[in-house]
Image (tube, coloured by chain):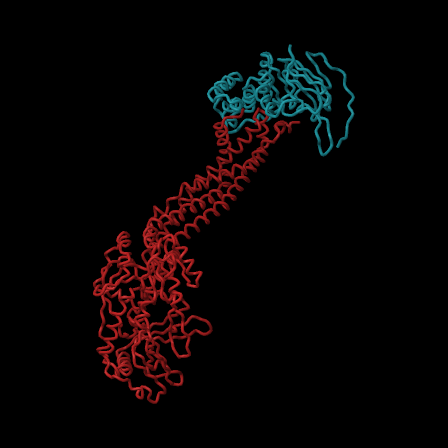
Chain colours: A cyan, B red
């Protein structure tokens, strides 16, 4: 399995109220292509920061982050936009669909941002909606869809530009069990097709569905279980700096 | 690589649908301001264009001619005499030469003005039909040097100043007395009727006979003025003359004149034919009419011949006139005080403290004579002296003048030259007035555009800034799914442009509606005074009409609603273009601010 994402000594420091706080501390991590990874941990443990960095929403303060062979830290703002547009796909807990656009237009949106023609974009959006099982709801607006349906539209949107990495931030947080299972099924299928899937979740049951579970605590990797085996058992000593 | 513009527009339009009410409300002031901008580019523009079309061309034909009124060259002569009325004046030859020998002047046509009583004369001319119209071309043709030259035996060419032709009369409505409270303008309005010469140009080319040297007629009423005390406006009590009043007046006139003249002969009308060759509006002239100096001697002779033939006593009996009343000086000779077409007064005063009617004959043309003109409170007589005139035909030749300039373009320079030399001349020619109206309109609309444009831009800025502040999360999501900074900037600017276009479209629609209302009111008011010459003609109730009339004198055209409502699209377009440019430049502030919103905001709250 080739490496899709590699973090080498990555630290992310935020300034909060004038005090520097490490959201992530010296993270070393490698994600393979087609790997399905669940990231867990309590609030403030750095899960979302990890997702932001991989997704190119933000830059690490220290260390090297390689995504598909390119050093994200060194990308210009425009290049990082392109990275977000073409290399990664985002799925959010709140779906964040454009309420005034139909399902198909929501899915077509990233393609239109990539200057794909309207006709082509709609054609592909239609295929993607078929894939997530929403063939019947293509022209519905978000308000006419259930939570599960909205999240599936959001997944289809994330897949619009055929990204190699799919990043999901609590994708099942607003869904019932049945819909959550449906979403997990889609993620697993994507993973089997070669897309690296990284899902941040609170839900132990959801996490268990993935081949690898990374647990974060205070910005450090506490455990990294792969197929039931702990890959990185050493818990590093955490020195709290500052504090509130 | 950024998103296509069409897509950005579609997304913006869709997103605005969500907050349509809020968007419309936020646009309301903007719509109103653009409406005002529209009105500003429509009505002044339409009005100036109407003036250009209907007044300017015609007026330009006359730009080469200027009337130098004889009052410009008169200097009042102050004496200790107990005279009433304006003091006599002397002619300032030096100033006259300065004005007429200026290098700008091509030809000088000496003219005699101050033709009083023309209003009633023209009104009574039986053979003048006002149906014939003097077209512009005819008028231009008529305004040639020939028009200022008198040929003996022909009708005297006369230039008419319709602005000075008007008469006030009372609305008796079958009543014998009228009480007018001048402090109440409405009361005065209903009882006083102002008549003025309308469509004066229709007189051009007309010939009419006019009586001059007319013996004074009787007034229609006596006026018993009452002052309301302090500085209050007076009240008048007018009493109509009765038959016995007229008998008393007859007797009085007989007493004054009868001893020396045969009254019937003195009253014999002297008729003279005149031909109207032009009108004097916009010529800074107070004269009711002007005739060539060359025509004066003939008229003068007729007048003196009548007085001579009516004389019954060769030598005036100074003793008799002096009597026990005191010193009366009688000087033999003839009097011409300029107003030799006679004098007519609508009211005479009646002093309740004396038994006799006091007749003010101060302006009647009588050969050199001192006559009792009034009695004071103690019953003593007051006298008015009519000195024998020293005016000679030579003096008449140098009165006023019509000058023809070498070029119409010199008019401004020439009037400046006059003013610089103490000869006050306010050029109220329609060309000058229209020029100042156009400049005024341009300045007004330009400032309106600048001020309103800034307000519109600020309103749009506020609206869009609020939109950006409200949409931080949404923008973050856009960024997270791959939108570049440039895309966000584009979205905000597109949104601002859409708002502006909505504002412009709605503003033009509302502006058109409001313009139609204003224009129709303007058309109604202005057309009421069109062709009229004097602001009094409006009766005071027509404010717009009065302003336009006072600006344009006798040159108020009939306005057409359609023409008034035609905006200057080029001007409006360029102004709206500037507005759009400013708006988009200002719009860059929220647009760039929006582009700086970090994509991290999209998933920060779940941290």
Q: Residue at x 25, y 73 (%)?
A: B303
Relative to B9, does residue B559 appear above or below in the rendering?
below
Toward the bottom, the furthest residue is B324
Toward the top, the furthest residue is A1
- Residue A89, horizontal then vertical, whole percent: 58, 20
Relative to A221, does residue B185 appear above or below in the rendering?
below
Q: Quadrant of residue B340?
A: bottom left
Q: Is residue B304 left or right of residue B328?
A: left
- Residue B289, horizontal then vertical, whole percent: 31, 64
Q: Quadrant of residue B248?
A: bottom left
Which of the two residues, B325 or B497, is positioned nearer the viewer here?
Answer: B325
Q: Is residue A200 visible?
A: no
Relative to B37, does residue B493 appear above or below in the rendering?
above
Relative to B433, does residue B422 appear above or below in the rendering?
below
Which of the two residues, B493 or B362, is positioned nearer the viewer here?
Answer: B362
Q: Is residue B75 visible?
A: yes
Q: Is residue A112 left or right of residue B409?
A: right
Which image quadrant: the N terminus of chain B? Answer: top right
- Residue B363, horizontal then vertical, whole percent: 33, 75
Q: Is residue B298 left or right of residue B599?
A: left
- Residue A119, horizontal then vertical, whole percent: 46, 20
Which image quadrant: the C terminus of chain B? Answer: top right
Which of the two residues, A15 or A80, is positioned nearer the viewer here?
Answer: A80
Q: Residue at x 54, y 37 (%)?
A: B587
Which of the two residues, B113 or B483, is positioned nearer the viewer here?
Answer: B113
What is the tally of numbered marks visible in this picture? 0
Q: Residue at x 43, y 49 (%)?
A: B441
Q: Is residue B410 left or right of residue A242?
A: left
């Amino acid at each position: 399995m080739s490496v899709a994402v590699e973090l080498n000594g990555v630290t992310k420091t935020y300034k909060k109220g004038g005090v520097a706080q490490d959201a992530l501390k010296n993270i070393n991590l490698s994600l393979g292509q087609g790997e399905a990874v669940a990231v867990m941990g309590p609030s403030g443990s750095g899960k979302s920061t990890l997702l932001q960095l991989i997704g190119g929403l933000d830059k690490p303060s220290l260390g090297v982050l390689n995504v598909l062979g390119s050093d994200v830290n060194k990308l210009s703002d425009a290049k990082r936009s392109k990275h977000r547009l073409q290399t990664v796909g985002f799925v959010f807990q709140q779906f964040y669909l454009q309420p005034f656009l139909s399902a198909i237009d929501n899915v077509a949106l990233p393609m239109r941002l990539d200057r794909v023609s309207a006709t082509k974009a709609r054609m592909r959006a239609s295929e993607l909606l078929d894939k997530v099982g929403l063939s019947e709801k293509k022209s519905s607006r978000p308000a006419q869809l259930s939570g599960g349906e909205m999240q599936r539209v959001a997944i289809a949107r994330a897949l619009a530009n055929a990204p190699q990495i799919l990043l999901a931030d609590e994708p099942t947080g607003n869904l019932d069990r049945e819909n959550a299972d449906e979403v997990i099924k889609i993620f697993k299928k994507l993973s089997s097709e070669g897309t690296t899937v990284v899902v941040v979740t609170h839900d132990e049951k959801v996490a268990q569905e993935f081949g690898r579970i990374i647990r974060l605590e205070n910005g450090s990797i506490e455990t990294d279980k792969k197929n039931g085996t702990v890959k990185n058992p050493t818990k590093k000593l955490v020195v709290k700096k500052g504090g509130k | 690589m950024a998103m296509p513009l069409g897509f950005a527009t579609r997304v913006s339009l869709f997103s605005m649908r969500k907050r349509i009410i809020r968007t419309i409300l936020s646009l309301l002031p903007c719509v109103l301001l653009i409406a005002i901008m529209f009105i500003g580019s429509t009505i002044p523009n339409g009005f100036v264009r109407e003036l250009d079309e209907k007044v300017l061309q015609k007026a330009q034909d006359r730009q080469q001619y200027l009337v130098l009124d004889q009052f410009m060259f008169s200097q009042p002569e102050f004496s200790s005499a107990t005279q009433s009325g304006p003091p006599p004046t002397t002619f300032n030859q030096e100033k006259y030469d300065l004005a007429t020998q200026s290098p700008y002047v091509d030809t000088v046509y000496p003219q005699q003005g101050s033709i009083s009583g023309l209003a009633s004369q023209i009104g009574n001319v039986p053979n003048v039909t006002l149906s014939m119209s003097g077209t512009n071309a005819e008028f231009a043709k008529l305004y040639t040097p020939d028009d200022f030259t008198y040929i003996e035996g022909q009708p005297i060419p006369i230039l008419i100043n319709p602005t000075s032709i008007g008469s006030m009369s009372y609305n008796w409505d079958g009543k014998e007395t009228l009480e007018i409270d001048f402090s109440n303008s409405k009361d005065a309005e209903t009882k006083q009727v102002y008549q003025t010469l309308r469509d004066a140009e229709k007189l051009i080319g007309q010939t009419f006979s006019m009586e001059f040297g007319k013996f004074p007629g009787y007034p229609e009423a006596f006026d018993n003025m009452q002052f309301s005390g302090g500085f209050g406006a007076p009240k008048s009590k007018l009493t109509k003359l009765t038959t016995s009043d007229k008998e008393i007046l007859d007797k009085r006139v007989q007493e004054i004149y009868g001893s020396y003249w045969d009254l019937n002969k003195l009253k014999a009308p002297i008729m003279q034919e005149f031909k109207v060759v032009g009108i004097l509006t916009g010529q800074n002239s107070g004269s009711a009419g002007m005739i060539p100096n060359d025509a004066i001697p003939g008229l003068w002779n007729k007048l003196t011949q009548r007085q001579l033939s009516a004389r019954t006593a060769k030598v005036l009996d100074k003793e008799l006139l002096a009597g026990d009343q005191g010193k009366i000086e009688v000087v033999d000779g003839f009097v011409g005080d300029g107003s030799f077409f006679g004098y007519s007064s609508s009211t005479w005063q009646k002093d309740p403290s004396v038994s006799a009617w006091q007749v003010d004959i101060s302006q009647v043309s009588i050969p050199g004579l001192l006559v009792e003109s009034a009695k004071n409170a103690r019953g003593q007589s007051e006298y008015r002296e009519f000195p024998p005139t020293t005016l000679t035909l030579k003096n008449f030749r140098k009165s006023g003048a019509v000058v023809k300039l070498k070029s119409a373009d010199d008019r401004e320079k020439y009037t400046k030259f006059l003013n610089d030399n103490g000869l006050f001349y306010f050029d109220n020619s329609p060309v000058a007035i229209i020029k100042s109206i156009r400049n005024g309109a341009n300045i007004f609309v330009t400032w309106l555009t600048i001020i309103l444009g800034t307000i519109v831009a600020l309103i749009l800025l506020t609206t869009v800034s609020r939109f950006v502040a409200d949409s931080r999360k949404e923008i973050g999501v856009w960024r997270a799914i791959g939108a570049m900074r440039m895309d966000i900037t584009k979205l905000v600017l597109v949104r601002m442009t859409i708002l502006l276009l909505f504002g412009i479209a709605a503003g033009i629609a509302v502006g058109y509606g409001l313009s139609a209302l204003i224009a129709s009111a303007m058309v109604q008011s202005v057309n009421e005074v069109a062709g009229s010459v004097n602001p009094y003609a409006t009766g005071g109730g027509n404010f717009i009409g009065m302003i336009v009339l006072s600006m344009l004198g006798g040159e108020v055209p009939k306005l057409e609603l359609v023409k008034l409502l035609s905006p200057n699209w080029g001007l409006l377009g360029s102004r709206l273009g500037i507005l759009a440019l400013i708006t988009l430049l200002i719009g860059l502030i929220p647009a760039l601010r929006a582009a700086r919103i970090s994509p991290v905001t999209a998933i920060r709250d779940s941290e």
